[in-house]
Image: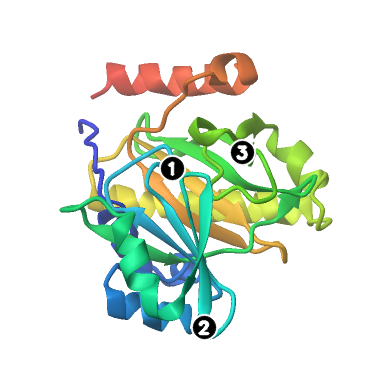
Amino acid sequence: MRHRYVTSKMKKTKPLLGHRAVAKHIPATHWYTPARLINMLSLYPVLYIKPDRGSCGKGIIRVKKQSAKTSLISCNKTSIKVPSKDLVKEIEKRMRRGKNYVIQQGITLATYRNKPFDLRIVLQKPAQKWRLTWMSAKVASSSSSIVTNVAQGARDAKIVQVLRGSDQSLNTPRVLNDLKRISTEIAYTLGSRFPFRIIGLDMAVDKRGKVWFIEANSKPSFHGLRSFDPIQYKRYLRAKKQIEANP
């Protein structure tokens, strides 16, 4: 079975919503419409609006409800306070015409030295079973960062170091165990729907220690990771060669 790329975020999220054990780790995720925006903002204090097809954190809009009358829109490292009556207009000015967008419940990410972080997990399928070959953290460049993508200024960090040093005193063994279990369930669920041989997962931990799925990538980037963690990189390369030898 040859690996195939699937770029749509929603297409990769929908199958997971039907998996009972996984679904409770997925933030509320829907297609963007003005009505959906207003409804979700009444339920969640922070929302993220993302291009359905896109990578590296480009084009992501964060909306924070500040009061019944105002919200804060953040995009491309700039923020603007807008009255509720202008919210839809101001958001759609920042969207690219003709593109579909996904709207997702914002997660209050755990922090490391006052900077939010999320987690990079990679699983590969050299034969019949999925193999977890990479785990690391991505720490945002500042406490107010909109995204934690390395392409947007975040830095890679060792996952155990970040979890142990988190500002919230997370239960590191439990979080790692949950990450491995949930990530593996996600890989098998998506692998049963699409011809995947490798999956990169953006996962998160909130300030209470709950693990969340953010999105899946069928073509995860390993740029700069060889020198960051040579041991894990060798593990990834070994599985990659086995996949190439057994397409």
In front: label 1 or label 3 = 1
Residue at image mark 3:
138
Who's the residue at 64% across and 57% down the image?
Answer: 109
Task: In the displayed orientation, state which residue is furthest to the left.
Answer: 98
In front: label 3 or label 2 = 2
Who's the residue at 29% across and 18% down the image?
Answer: 244
Which numbered disc, 1 or 3, marks the residue that appears first in the sequence?
1
Instruction: Say whether residue 68 is left or right of residue 157.
Output: left
Q: What residue type is labelled 3?
A: Lys
The x, y position of residue 38, in whole percent, is: 38, 80
Dot 2 crowding, Cα within 10 Å, few <14, some 14–19, many 20+: few
* Placement of 139 over or under 35, stated as above or below: above
Instruction: Say whether residue 145 is left or right of residue 58.
Output: right
Q: Marks 3/2: CA distance?
A: 34 Å
* Placement of 180 over or under 101, stated as above or below: above
The x, y position of residue 233, in whole percent, is: 55, 20
* Placement of 182 over or under 140, stated as above or below: below
Decide: marks 2, 1 in contact (CB < 8 A)?
no
Who's the residue at 15% across and 53% down the image?
Answer: 98
Q: What residue type is labelled 1?
A: Gly
Residue at image mark 1:
57
Residue at image mark 2:
69
Decide: marks 1, 3 in contact (CB < 8 A)?
no
In front: label 2 or label 1 = 2
Q: Marks 1/3: CA distance?
A: 13 Å
Dot 3 crowding, Cα within 10 Å, few <14, some 14–19, many 20+: many
Q: What residue type is labelled 2?
A: Lys
Secondary structure under badge 3? strand
Residue 35, numbered label: none
Secondary structure under badge 1? loop
Which numbered disc, 3 or 2, marks the residue that appears first in the sequence?
2
Decide: marks 3, 2 in contact (CB < 8 A)?
no
